[in-house]
Amino acid sequence: MSKPRYPVIEIDSNKCTVPFYCKKCLEICPTSVFMVHAVKVEKGRETNPQDPGAYVLAAPMRDKCSVCNDCIEVCPEDAIKIYFPSDT
Amino acid sequence: MNWIDKAYGDPKYGNGRWYLNPKNHSRNMYKIKKPDQKSAAFGSDPEAQSGARIFEIMQTRFEDPEKFERMVKEADAMRTKGPFQIGQVIPIQEAFKVAELSYPIGAMHCICRYHWRANEERNEHEYSCTGLGVGMLKWERWPERYKGGVNFMTPDETKEWLMKWNKKGLVHIIMTFGGSYVGGICNCDYPDCGMIRNRIDYGITTGCIKSPWVAKVDYDQCTGCGICVQRCQFGAIKFEVTIEKTNIDQFKCYGCGLCETACPTKGIELIERESLPGLKEVW
């Protein structure tokens, strides 16, 4: 059985530094493929959404991506790339 | 006796009503921690950990689909054994009973909407999740959860609050959050709730088991207004054009009762799953 092909969503974390503060792609995605989580955690303190690199953006539900490219258009940092893996 | 009662307790509180068993609100709440041992389930920030964990599991789906299938099956086997890896849809009448049973009750922000939509819910008007039991009292140790604070509520306030979200169209799911006791009532919808989404899209049953009820249309009462169709988060309700009435697929129905509470003519009733031999094993 061949693996099903899904769109690959590449997020450049050097450009996308404050996803929890910006959240434009997270809010616009019609199938909600994105997810944001904190990587910088200090005990007893809330992670600052505006702290660069404190949160990372990922696209774990990319099998539900229809490649409508709304997130690419809305991204102020041009950090998202979506492509279909080629057959070869 | 059905599998839920076998795994989680006592049929004397009602068929399949494990969440009304007081024991399940208290068991193992405080565990004695050995100095060299770290808590297995939760670290200093369960929110960040759960986020990373969810991402890991989802990643497995792409990299090793067969392993993912196995993980889903293992999780499903776990639910029938106990103890407590489950979430279950409940209608609002049952959520009210839980509100009377559990203490303390605190409203807080929803972790799923936080992860999937970066929804912050920073005050008591926005909080859409509830924590139940003494786990709430040490919540401030978890900064990501505590960020806006917690709004503690009386049973009556809780009912009012649950009704607010029910009217807006959210499904109540009673959760153990992987711990060993009832930990909260989530108010969920698709797609920004992880539990409903995992079940519908990926077949992960443990977080979103169907309730001990199913909805049934009373065709004499149904006027075909279609309000219930918009309410269903599970795609179980259709409008049957030729008879101009609602049609409920009981095999897709999760028994949340959202259609029942919205029906203006009382044309939908919830009946016990156990009373229907064809649905007895459909959880």
Image (cartoon, coloured by chain):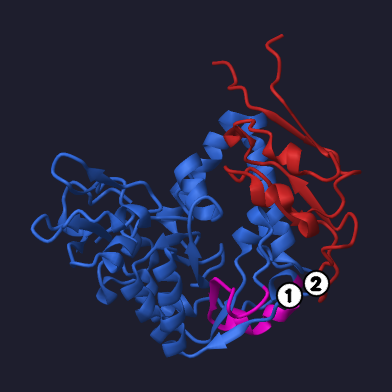
**Residue B136 among those drawn in magenta:** yes
Q: Which residue is labeled 2 in the image? A: A46
**Which residue lies at the image location 83% right of the left edge and 74% below the top edge?**
A45
Say above or below: A12 vs B140.
Answer: above
Q: Position of residue B35 (x, y in %)?
A: 78, 74
Label 1 near label 2: C-beta < 8 Å?
A: yes
* Relative depth, front residue between A48 and B281: A48
Subunit ID for the residue under disc 2: A
Question: Seen in the image, is B276 located left or right of residue A1?
Answer: left
Q: Which residues are magenta?
A: B122-143
Chain A colour is red
Q: Position of residue A88 (x, y in %)?
A: 72, 9
Q: Is residue B52 visible?
A: no
Tell me which corner region of the image, top left, top right, bottom left or bottom right, holds residue B61: top right
Chain letter of the blue region:
B
Tell me which corner region of the image, top left, top right, bottom left or bottom right, holds residue B1: bottom left
* Relative depth, front residue between B232 and B176: B232
Q: Position of residue B242 (x, y in %)?
A: 15, 39
